[in-house]
Structure formats: C-alpha cells, structure tokens
Amino acid sequence: MKHYALVLGMVGLVAAGDRMSARQAINDAQIAAIVVTANQVDIDAGKLAETKGSSQQIKDFGKQMVTDHTGVNKQATDLVTRLKVTPEDNPTAQSLKKGGVDNIKNLNTLSGAAFDKAYIAHEVDYHQAVLDAVDKTLIPGATNADLKALLVKVRQAFQAHLDHAKMVQAAIGK
C-alpha cells in the first residue's frame, strides 16, 4: 500500500514539473537542483539496498545506482561550478527529496524478499518518473547548451537503469 502512495507522489513530481513549465519557464539553476536531488535520492536508496538487500541482484543493483548516480552528480556539480550557476531549490526538487525520504522510511520497515521487491518496484517507477521529467520538463527547459547536452547524455543512463531494474524485477518476481 505504501508503494502505491510513493508512485502517486512520483506521478505528482512529473505533474509538478509540467505545471512549473506551464506556469513559467524552468531555469537552469532549478534544473541543476532537480538533477542533483534526483541523483541523491537514488544514491541513498542504493546504499540501503547494498546493506539490506537479501538477494545479490538487489545488492549489485543498489551498488550500481550509487556508483552511476554519484558520477552523474559529479558531472552536474562540475558543470554548474564551471557555469557559475548555484542550484535553486524549487517545488519539483522538494517533491523529489520528500519522496526519497518517504521511500527510505518505507524500505527501513521491510526485510528479506519484501524489501527486495519494494526496492526494485520503486526503482522501476522512479526511473520512469525521472525519464518523464527529463523528457517533458528538463531537456525542453534547459537554455544552456552544455546543461542540455548533459541531460541528453544522462537520459540514456536513466533508460538503461530502468531497463535493468525491470530485468531484476522480473528475475526476483514482482
């Protein structure tokens, strides 16, 4: 039941991004905050999966999320530093952060196969929601060519993560 609440929250994330772009153009500083927050959410969940996962597939997937999303955050941080852009907090970044906190709270109540299933289900839904936000809000809203190029580049990684998460989910059983 908690899983569905998290999914609804992520759908809200995409909707919030759509509302933000309809209300006003999202700026590069807000996009930077969203990218860093989205990656940190997955890093935190991945660290938990590394330690609490009951299957090796979940532990390995969690480790990959930590490694890959840490790398994306480094690229994003290096870029905004070079561009002298300070990430600007915004409702979408706040929604992501709250969803990540809620997910960790939920996962901490689970163990064994229940943890594994909840973690990987969230990863599937989360990566889909992030891809939707990247496609509908972040890439169209980015004005800096380097930032847009980074978003296009990391979109491929998010898609690969989604595909991998779906494979793990199928292997461990929904």
Image (cartoon, grey):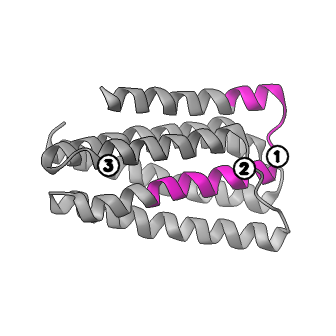
The span picked out in magenta is: 18-43
Asked if the residue under mark 2 is in contact with the one under mark 1, i.e. CB atoms within 8 Å, the reply is yes
Quadrant position of the N terminus in the picture: top left
Picture disc at residue 165: 3
Does the magenta segment cover residue 34?
yes
Q: Dot 2 lies on which element?
A: helix
Does the magenta segment cover residue 36?
yes
Residue 19 x, y percent position in the rendering: 72, 26
Q: Quadrant of residue 94?
A: top right
Identify residue for label 1. Answer: 27
Q: Quadrant of residue 26?
A: top right
Amino acid type indicated by mark 1:
Asn
Q: Eyeballing the image, is 6 above or below 40?
A: above
Asked if the residue under mark 2 is in contact with the one under mark 3, i.e. CB atoms within 8 Å, the reply is no
Residue 133 in view (yes/no): yes
Residue 29 x, y percent position in the rendering: 79, 53
